[in-house]
Image (spheres, rainbow, N blue to C red):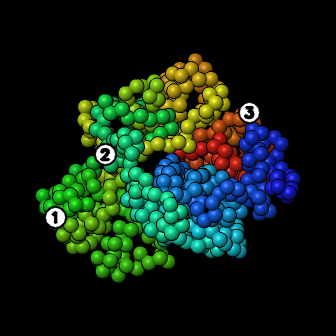
């Protein structure tokens, strides 16, 4: 894949093979992008417009998997314009380092996907960033807001990587990086305040700060954010039927919620946020382990409430994270714990955390958190659980459906379970209220052209958004070929939504269904095996412009599916392994390979 650029930055040799599955417009953009990425000779690529005012340009860049980073970046760019900057929001994955070096100022809002990975659309940029040397970003001023989840070992890893690599490549940090742990609003507010205090000298003296430039929402924005994360809607539970048949080792439920008069809107591909309550027996056990009266009063964010209610609704109990153990070790004064939390023992700390919850820690060191306020301050805030929506508003007006696997397991002589999944299964009855909000996922959308073929890969509960897609397409009368890969353990007991899928097939709303039931034969068969078996036809669909969607487990399934796709591109497209990897990154950058994995 050698490449040279002609004068003017056009690739003299195309990096993408002539039969690569892209339109002429996508090919032109991707060839130019990868030529700049691999050769660094594209001096004119991404140059600022001739009428841009020197010193005033702000590039607000986002690396987003589910849409949160993009939403914040567009919000920040809008405010920057109001403050007199020449600002625009762009996907980080659409830039090369050469283009970035000429940006002047770059404000980066970057999510970390999975356990430390870059979002799919930024994978090519991440590879270029890792390989770069020298002072290629000299002259760039930047700041980074990193979004992540501290329950993962490599918390905010991609944002941290950007921050460190930019500095190593000669860029100058305008403001220190801020890391956001799931709840992004407060870190975002701190980030923007820090930015404007540092950049106020860069804005034109004549620029007035208009109404709303301080981050206050306008009426339209306020209406849009009604019943958001911090003000959820109490949706009525209408049903929670078990989808598995007799003899199954799993318990997957079809949750149906009424949106009532909330006017909450969602699109197929979005997720629903749930604020669950912790299991009463776990709360009681924690109070017992710390000899804390349930009615003792504590304060959280200025609100007074009982410690029992605080543990049930405000604190994370079922997941033990590294920051919690680090804080606990400081209070306990235990040499073993203090040794375990040292930076050079991070792998051992992760093994220690596996399968444990807060109660395990408190039972081992019961005297550490006798004070109720110390106890709640020690624990991280409860995080909402996000589930891919499995319904279409066109097909089920006024409702939202979820497909949730109930998590139950034994550990340390105790019954344990997922906080939200067991809450739905055991503690919320039909007619009860469930606090919900919509989490937008603008990347995970049906193609704008309804005739575009789509390939959906969703084993287990990963089928959720594809049920939504199929219902939506049928209800809207959309055309285009559809292909679903679905997998589970046993066809007899675990074929989720079987009758619906068969009706979609019969009516040709689903063109093809390939299934993999791993335990129905001596050797286990998974969706990636079915993909490889159908590799020639999958490659044909890609050449016809198909979009690929993947939903489900990130730790193993998504990696295996990605490897299968690379193998298919390499074998049937006659590519090298490196070329196949680049081509998949190009598909992701073009929005034709999107994943909702967890």
Q: Toward the viewer: 89 or 416?
A: 89
Q: CA distance from mark 3 to mark 2?
A: 44 Å
Residue at 37 percent across and 62 percent down: it is: 320
Residue located 64% across and 74% down the image: 170
Residue ID for mark 3: 544
Q: Quadrant of residue 271?
A: top left
- Estimate the x, y position of residue 559 in percent, counting from the top left: 60, 51
Of callouts 1 and 2, the N-terminal one: 2
Residue drawn at x 83%, y 53% is 11
Location of residue 273 (image quadrant) = top left
Question: What distance separates the C-alpha of mark 1 from that of mark 2?
Answer: 30 Å
**Disc 3 secondary structure class:** loop
Where is mark 1, residue-wise?
Answer: 292
Question: Quick one: SS at disc 2?
Answer: loop
The residue drawn where x is 37% and y is 52% is 216
Decide: few, some or many residues near mark 2? Use Cα within 10 Å; few <14, some 14-19, many ≥20: few
Check disc 1 and report its element: helix, strand or loop. loop
Q: Badge 1 local density, few (<14 within 10 Å), some, or many (20+)?
A: some
Q: Nearer the viewer, mark 1 or mark 2?
A: 2
Q: CA distance from mark 1 to mark 3?
A: 64 Å
Instruction: Tell which tag, 1 or 3, sits nearer the viewer.
Output: 3
């Amino acid at each position: 894949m050698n490449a040279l650029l002609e004068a003017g930055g056009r690739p003299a040799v195309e990096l993408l093979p002539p039969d690569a599955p892209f339109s002429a417009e996508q090919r032109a953009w991707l060839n130019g992008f990868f030529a700049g990425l691999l050769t660094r000779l594209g001096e004119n690529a991404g140059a600022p417009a001739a009428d841009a005012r020197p010193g005033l340009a702000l590039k607000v860049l986002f690396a987003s998997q589910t849409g949160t980073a993009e939403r914040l970046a567009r919000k920040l760019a809008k405010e920057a314009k109001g403050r007199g900057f020449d600002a625009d929001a762009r996907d980080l994955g659409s830039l090369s380092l050469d283009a970035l070096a000429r940006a002047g100022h770059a404000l980066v809002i970057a999510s970390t996907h999975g356990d430390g990975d870059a979002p799919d659309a930024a994978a090519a940029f991440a590879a270029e960033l890792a390989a770069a040397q020298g002072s290629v970003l000299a002259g760039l001023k930047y700041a980074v807001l990193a979004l992540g989840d501290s329950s993962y070992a490599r918390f905010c890893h991609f944002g941290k990587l950007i921050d460190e690599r930019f500095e190593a490549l000669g860029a100058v940090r305008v403001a220190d990086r801020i890391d956001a742990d799931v709840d992004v609003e407060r870190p975002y507010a701190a980030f923007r305040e820090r930015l404007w205090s540092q950049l106020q000298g860069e804005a034109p003296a004549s620029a007035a700060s208009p109404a709303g430039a301080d981050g206050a929402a306008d009426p339209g924005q306020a209406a849009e954010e009604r019943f958001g994360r911090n003000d959820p809607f109490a949706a009525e539970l209408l049903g929670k039927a078990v989808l598995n048949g007799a003899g199954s080792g799993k318990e997957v439920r079809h949750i149906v919620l009424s949106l009532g008069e909330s006017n909450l809107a969602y699109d197929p591909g979005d997720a629903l946020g749930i604020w669950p309550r912790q299991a009463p027996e776990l709360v009681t056990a924690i109070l017992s382990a710390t000899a804390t009266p349930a009615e003792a009063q504590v304060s959280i964010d200025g609100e007074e409430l009982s410690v029992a209610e605080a543990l049930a609704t405000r604190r994370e109990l079922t997941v033990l994270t590294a920051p919690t153990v680090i804080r606990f070790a400081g209070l306990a004064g235990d040499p073993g714990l203090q040794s375990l939390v040292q930076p050079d023992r991070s792998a051992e700390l992760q093994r220690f955390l596996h399968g444990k919850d807060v109660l395990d820690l408190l039972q081992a060191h019961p005297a550490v958190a006798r004070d109720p306020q110390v106890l709640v301050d020690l624990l991280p805030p409860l995080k909402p659980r996000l589930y891919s929506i499995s319904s279409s508003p066109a097909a089920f007006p006024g409702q939202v459906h979820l497909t949730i696997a109930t998590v139950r397991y034994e550990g340390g002589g105790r019954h344990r379970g997922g906080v939200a999944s067991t809450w739905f299964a055991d503690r919320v009855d039909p007619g009860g209220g469930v606090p919900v909000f919509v989490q937008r996922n603008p990347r995970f959308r049906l193609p704008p052209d309804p005739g575009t073929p789509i390939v959906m890969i969703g084993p287990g509960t990963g089928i959720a958004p594809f049920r939504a897609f199929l219902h939506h397409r049928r209800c809207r009368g959309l055309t285009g070929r559809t292909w679903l890969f679905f997998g589970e353990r046993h066809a007899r007991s675990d074929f989720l939504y079987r009758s619906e899928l068969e009706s979609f097939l019969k009516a040709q709303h689903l063109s093809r269904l390939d299934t993999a039931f791993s335990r129905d034969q001596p050797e286990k068969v998974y969706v990636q095996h079915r993909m490889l078996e159908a590799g020639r036809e999958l490659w044909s669909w890609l050449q016809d412009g198909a979009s690929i969607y993947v939903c489900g487990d990130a730790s193993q399934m998504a990696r295996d599916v990605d490897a299968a796709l690379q193998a298919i591109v390499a074998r049937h497209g006659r590519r090298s392994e490196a070329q196949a990897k680049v081509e998949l990154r190009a598909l992701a950058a073009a929005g034709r390979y999107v994943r909702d994995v967890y």
